[in-house]
Image (cartoon, grey):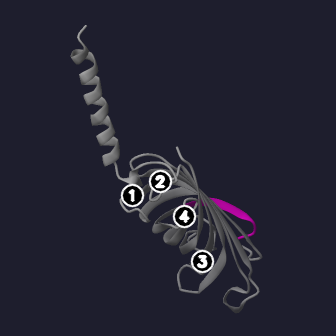
Amino acid sequence: MRFDKIVLPGVLLALCLSATAQSIPAASRFGLDRGQTAVMEIGLDYTFFHANAPPSQCGCFSLNGGDGILVVNASHGISLVADLSAAHANNVNATTQNITLFNYLAGPRYSYRTSHRFTPYAEVLAGGSTELSNYTYVLDVNAFAASGGVGANMILSRHTGWTILEADYLYSRLPNNSNNHQSDLRLISGIIFRFGPR
């Protein structure tokens, strides 16, 4: 067996594989070095809801609360997201009505990972919503909920990031003594804790 027929092709193959690996952008690789994608991220956020009641007019009001998000990243910009949020409002529209809203959603996210620091994304989630209220038609009820939205994250350090802003349309089937549909706007922003590498 000749040396040049065995070793030389093996060396050439190793060099080609090394060059290919080095050509992959950092944002497409998993790890915690600058610009790399973390395997898992946990977000703790401030949440703002803009809601309306009754649905036939804009008796608009706001709810404030918090949000916890778990993101498990995969290749090709795909992630799986679990999103738990809670928000509260007192004396809605100068009435005695108080509302606490819980949402528990999950689904896919697509992230455009080309930058070392900024990552825009879009996601579609589905799950449920629970409303605790002293309003007659919404006394501790659960219903289907879904959301769709876009946002942008920024890497701050190896282990931290920032959800600059995420804007979501949130739909739910909570009863309201009219059409039993709720359409809300949700805005979130907060800190991200990054875990890895893969």
Q: Nearer the viewer, residue 123 or 198?
A: 198
Asked whether disc 2 touches disc 4, contact meaning CB atoms under 8 Å apart, the reply is no
Give how far across and how far down residue 125 sits, in percent: 52, 57
Dot 4 amino acid type: Ser
Mark 1: few, some, or many residues within 10 Å (few <14, many ≥20)? many
Q: Nearer the viewer, residue 114 or 109?
A: 114
**Earlier-in-chain disc, 3 versus 4:** 3
Residue extending furthest toward the bottom: 94
Asked whether disc 2 touches disc 3, contact meaning CB atoms under 8 Å apart, the reply is no
Mark 2 lies on residue: 37
Give how far across and how far down residue 113 sits, in percent: 39, 58
Q: CA distance from mark 1 to mark 2?
A: 8 Å
Secondary element type, mark 4: loop
Residue 30 appears left or right of 60 = left
Mark 4 lies on residue: 157
Q: Is residue 141 magenta?
A: yes
| Residue numbers of the magenta segment | 138-146
Q: Which residue: 73% across, 87% down?
A: 91
Asked whether disc 1 touches disc 3, contact meaning CB atoms under 8 Å apart, the reply is no
Dot 1 amino acid type: Arg
Q: CA distance from mark 1 to mark 3?
A: 27 Å
Asked whether disc 1 touches disc 2, contact meaning CB atoms under 8 Å apart, the reply is yes
Q: CA distance from mark 2 to mark 3?
A: 28 Å
Nearer the observer: mark 1 or 3; the answer is 1
